[in-house]
Amino acid sequence: MDFLLDLELNQELYNYIESNNIENKNKFINDIINLGFNNYKQKDENNLLNNINSLITNHPILSEIRNSTSEITKNFFKPISKGNYGENIISEYLSNKYQNYELIDTSTIPHSGDFQLNMNDINERIIVEVKTYNDVISRNQINKLIYDMEYTGINYSIFISLCSKIVGKKQNIEWEIFKNKEQKDNIIIFISDAHSNIDNIQIGLTILKSFIKLLNTQNVNENTLMYLNKFTQQSYITINKNVCELLYLKDNINQIKNNIYSLHDNISKQILELYHTFTIFDNEYNNKIKLLQTNLTQEFSNITNIIENSNDNNDIYLFLDTYKKNKNIYEILQVIISDLISSNYIFEIVAKNELKVECCKINILKTNINIVFNDGVQLKNININNWNKYKNLF
């Protein structure tokens, strides 16, 4: 490969070589070229980094990732305790996500929780308890929160463990519903491993608000907790499936964030490809969480309908009371009504000795009961001894 050295542009170099009687001129010139090339490469790399930094600054999401990561890194090196660090994370999160709510720092007030959140739209205040333990949170910590609820008179709370599981809680979102000493309904929402998906706090608060609204409706009676527990048993599988999908999406987002920061100093092309993938996951995640909140609202609407239907059965129990003097009829009629209500049948009183449900009529005789189905099939002489073999027909 041939190349020319322009003496006019490099006159100073030529004069230096001649005046210093450098013997191995080829080696000297090659050394100078190599030194200059290294400086040129450094300048080119700096330009690339400047272009990448400019690209990140001009993209709001990438800029947010960089700023958030820098902020987290700074916080890790601040001379503050893990507890304060965890409280700071939750305080910032709640303040950003619930700007219409009043968040009060009560960490220095005995038996008051780390924070108290005024939920203005439902006129309730809840306790927020935050733990940053590496080990499983013990039952003793839960009992302390229950004591704080009794001490403050606040009936609702959310217990957040940032870094570990909570004893007795297999899922990352669970709850307990119980009566306090004054027989008022208390609810605690438990969020385990919140660092894996901090947006589980939003889901937990949505569930808590729905519970509170349900407990405050005028149609709620002593059956409310039964229906809430039924909701817990039957509907949690659906919620947990959605939570797991959100966690999967969040894990992908977090992994992409880490990959972006490990690569952005070297390869701008890969950053843009990751940014595209990140956007897809982020949009899907936001759509999923909105859909989940909508589904939660619908779930509680269904429960309200069930409770309202249960109130319609009050007349049936009054009807049942009229047969208390007839022991045989009262016992079998009580069992039939209880079993059919459990299967979501709604009763209609046709006459003083006749009831009707969707599929049949129940005729009450002096010593036993007959059932006539809509298709004409009859069950005669039903009593407490033979009901079990008939009830499966329903």
Image (spheres, rainbow, N blue to C red):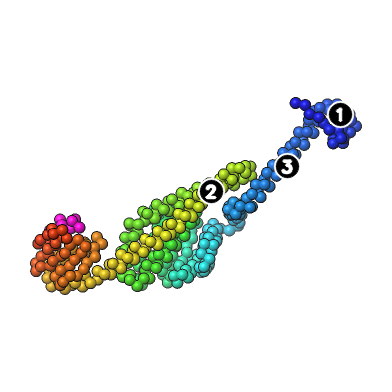
- The residue drawn where x is 15% and y is 58% is 375
- The residue drawn where x is 16% and y is 64% is 361
Closest to the observer, 153 or 226: 226
Closest to the camera, between mark 2 and mark 1, is: 2
Name the residue type under label 1.
Ile
Q: List the residue tagged with mark 1.
A: 22
Q: Quadrant of the C terminus?
A: bottom left
Residue 143 in the image: x percent, y percent? Answer: 41, 63
Q: CA distance from mark 3 to mark 2?
A: 31 Å
> Magenta stretch?
385-394
Closest to the observer, 272 or 132: 272
Closest to the observer, 178 or 65: 65
Secondary element under disc 1, as helix, strand or loop, is loop
Residue 369 in the image: x percent, y percent? Answer: 12, 64
Residue 383 sits inside the magenta stretch: no
Q: List the residue tagged with mark 2.
A: 278
Residue 131 in the image: x percent, y percent? Answer: 48, 58
Residue 387 sits inside the magenta stretch: yes
Instruction: Kindly identify which numbered label has been placed on residue 43.
Output: 3
